Image (tube, rainbow, N blue to C red):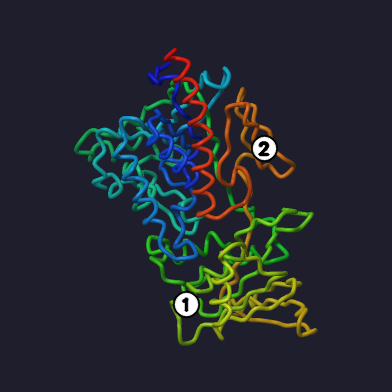
Amino acid sequence: MAEAGARESGVLVIGSGMAGLTAAIESMEAGNDVYIVEKEPYLGGRVAGFNKYFPKLCPPSCGLEINFRRIKNGHRRLKFFTLAEVEKVSGSPGAFDVTVRLNPRFVLQDRCTACGLCVDVCPEERPNQFDYGMSTTKAIYLPHQMAMPMKYVIEEGYCQGDSCSKCVQVCPTDAIDLRMTATTLDLKVSSIIVATGWKPYDATQLELLGFQYPNVISNVMMERLTAPNGPTKGKLLRPSDGKPAKRVAFVQCAGSRDVNHLPYCSAICCLSSLKEATFVREQYPEDSRVYIFYIDIRAPGNMETFYRKVEQDENIRFIKGKVAKVEEDPATGNIIVEADDMVGGRKVQATVDLLVLSTGMVPNTKDLNIPGLGLQVDEFGFAEEDRSSGVYVAGVSRRPMDVTSSTRDGTGAALKAIQTSFKVKERASL
């Protein structure tokens, strides 16, 4: 077992989305040793796959690049471990012992130059989960164009291993080790911040809303379809035949506020659809048409201004009513959406090229089971923080929230963790 050499005044952050990155960087810049444990092969979390985020509609590369630079500037105090998981925790506030499992990347990070020669010769493909399965990569791949670390990784289940070894043969720096195995390391830290983020609600459970049809996608898939580094290089094309998606409908509360799925509101879904409606209008300004089927529009805080701006677009129609039926026209692949218009008092029907289901957020803490961590969750899986435990919670691990709120929440978690670390340092100096 490797020893990380961590000092007991350190802070451990589990997860590296916007809340986790913020918590880690703020803790580091306050003078603490910080350790990030991230299960994916890159930092940045789910926001790294967005096209833009509101209200300024700027790309995620802006915020991520700034945070990555801050990490590099403070690299002596901050270490991060990707493809890693916390196996167990013991101890008490101010003196936690943490065991971390480092899963094999099969690529030596200190040798990989990201030249890409390995990809050219790899014969195997894998579904690209960064694009929610809408594209493929080779078995050896770069997670995305702005990945940190900017290093390749091999998907074990798709690689032929020693029976192929073509990537090993062409690598100019001998960076590929197909026999790499998992290792563990020990950390000693004073406090722990849980910022494990979220996953979208499983849209395959929404057969009534037509997710079984090729031209029905979820809101996170819509982000990738319109992102410049997405499966269509940012061009809004429908999955079935690659034709331009000019008539697009959004179904709000897809599986949310529903006792059979997610009973709660995820807070950001309305804003997500408003934002994605602007993507459609920007790509096809002359002849696009957007329909938004909603129960009620929720735009908390200063987002009301953003909502009013989108509402003024004459080519975006808001229909207050729950969708009753979704069908596919087999001849064209078009999607037919039927709903009750509560305002007009009649049934309405819209035929569109693409239907987007605005699915909710499911906290990853719902399935987080780390022995010794002692994290309690509510009936929906959101973590309930006990400040006396030395384990703090940030971002969507605590409740549904947008990127801006997650960033603020990460700062708040850092302040709590810093206080614990300060007390440890203070005791050590006596």
Query: Which structural element holds mark 2?
Result: strand
Which image quadrant is residue 283 in?
bottom left
Whether residue 186 is visible: no
Picture residue at 27% right of the left edge, 36% below the top: 168
Whether residues under marks 1 and 2 lie with C-beta atoms below 8 angstroms apart, the answer is: no
Picture residue at 42% right of the left edge, 36% below the top: 82
Q: Which mark is residue 260?
A: none
Which image quadrant is residue 212 in?
bottom right
Looking at the image, is 365 positioned above or below residue 250? above
Q: Left or right of 368: which side holds 107?
A: left
Q: Residue pushed farthest left? A: 172
Residue type of the residue flagged with mark 1: Pro
Per the model, the C-alpha gap separating discs 1 and 2 is: 45 Å
Which quadrant holds the N terminus? top left
Name the residue beneath numbered marker 1.
244
Q: Position of residue 390 (x, y in %)?
A: 58, 27
Comparing 46 with 94, the one in front is 94
Picture residue at 52% right of the left edge, 21% below the top: 94
Residue type of the residue flagged with mark 2: Glu
Q: Position of residue 73 (x, y in %)?
A: 29, 39
Whether residue 26 is visible: yes
Which quadrant holds the C terminus? top left
Name the residue beneath numbered marker 2.
384
Comparing 54 with 336, the one in front is 54
Q: Position of residue 74 (x, y in %)?
A: 32, 36
Picture residue at 26% right of the left edge, 38% below the top: 112
